Image (cartoon, rainbow, N blue to C red):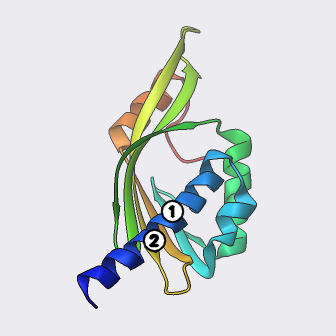
Amino acid sequence: MSRAQLAEKSLDTQALFDRYHVGWKTRNPEMIASLHSEDSIFWVHDGAEPINGRDALRRYCAELFAKSPFGFEEGRMFFGVDYWVMEWSAVIDQVDTAGKPFTAKVEMLDVVTVNPAGEVTRKDVYVNGPQRVEAFTRAGLSPSRN
């Protein structure tokens, strides 16, 4: 494949990312799941097991959005023929054990692969563990996965 063809394909991957990211920013489980393949793997590397399949991902996202009000701070993004990588931080408003509000930021890294049909086949989310533990501990919550 020529460089021009690779560049053109990368733009398609970026367009898919743009649609996908709207699903996350608007907290829309249906939209997110619709952009994944039926046999997709979604894995948050925080001690949890991977989520397998579109339907399981839809349920996971609905539960996540219901219990975890978080925002995003976007960082660097890299696009390739069949992948994207995004650095970002989860921004979470919390209250510490003394009752004082604070905003926790936990750095994350998404590594996403895409099939030729333009579906997300795998998303790995790598979590900055020490930042996560510090934020949960400060809020008086268990840092273990709920």
Q: Which mark is residue 13?
A: 2
Q: Could one spot residue 139 in this view of the protein?
A: yes
Going by the picture, which residue comes out furthest to the bottom? 1
Residue shown at the point (33%, 75%) measured from the top left: 7
Residue 131 at what x, y percent from top left? Answer: 37, 35
Residue 58 at what x, y percent from top left? Answer: 71, 64
Q: Is residue 35 left or right of residue 92?
A: right
The image quadrant of residue 66 is: top right
The image quadrant of residue 29 is: bottom right
Mark count: 2
Q: Amino acid at mark 1?
A: Phe
Q: Amino acid at mark 2?
A: Thr
Q: Is residue 48 above or below residue 122?
A: above
Q: Is residue 118 left or right of residue 26?
A: left
Say whether marks 2 and 1 touch (CB < 8 Å): yes
Q: Is residue 54 left or right of residue 132?
A: right
In the picture of the structure, the residue carrying the numbered disc 1 is: 17
